[in-house]
């Protein structure tokens, strides 16, 4: 039940336009996102930065050339992920099957 509620919350955020969801199918195999989670942060004022996590710690990446590498990595992940509409349908299907 908790998982259904979590999925419903994410879908509500998608429906309201608060987030964009793209699911990376499990059958993709090896992909650029296996290096670990990261967040590309675009503040209203100042340059973009990245918050990257590892097993041991999180770190803020501020060097423009490193931020550019993460932006490229993010683009590669978007290219192999399902489009947003298909991702929302997939999450709804999974939620409804629970």
Image (tube, helix red, strand yellow):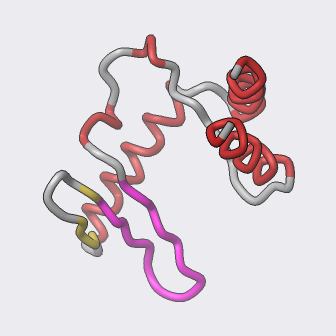
Check the picture and name the quadrant holding the N terminus.
Answer: top right
Above or below for 19 versus 34: below
On the image, the x and y values in percent for residue 46 come to 47, 86
The quadrant where residue 8 appears = top right
Res 65 → quadrant? bottom left
* Residue 61 point in image, percent of width and height: 27, 69
The one of 7 and 49 positioned closer to us in this rendering: 7
Please, is residue 52 above or below residue 41 in the view? Answer: above
Left or right side of 26 for 54:
left
User: Looking at the picture, does residue 52 appear above or below residue 36?
Assistant: below
Residue 6 image position (x, y, % from top left): 66, 45
Above/below status of 3 relative to 82: below
Residue range highlighted in magenta: 38-52
- How many marks do you count on the picture? 0
In the rendered image, residue 26 lying in the magenta stretch gets the answer no
Q: Residue at x 53, y 36 (%)?
A: 78
Q: Is residue 16 left or right of residue 80?
A: right
Residue drawn at the location 64% of the way across and 42% of the way down: 2
Foreground residue among 24 and 45: 24
- Residue 84: x and y in percent read 71, 35
Q: Residue at x 41, y 53 (%)?
A: 71
Q: Residue furthest left?
A: 56
**Residue at image location 74% in from the left, 32% down from the top:** 88
Residue at the top extreme, as displayed: 27
Tell me if 87 is positioned left or right of 47 in this view: right
| Most distant residue in the bottom direction | 45
């Amino acid at each position: 039940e908790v998982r259904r509620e979590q999925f419903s919350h994410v879908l509500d955020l998608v429906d309201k336009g608060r987030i964009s969801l793209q699911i990376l199918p499990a059958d993709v195999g090896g992909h650029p996102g296996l290096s670990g989670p990261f967040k590309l942060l675009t503040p209203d004022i100042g340059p973009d930065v990245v918050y990257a996590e590892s097993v041991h710690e999180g770190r803020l990446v501020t060097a423009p050339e490193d931020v550019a590498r993460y932006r490229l990595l993010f683009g590669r992940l978007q290219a192999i992920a399902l489009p947003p509409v298909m991702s929302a349908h997939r999450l709804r299907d999974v939620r409804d099957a629970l």
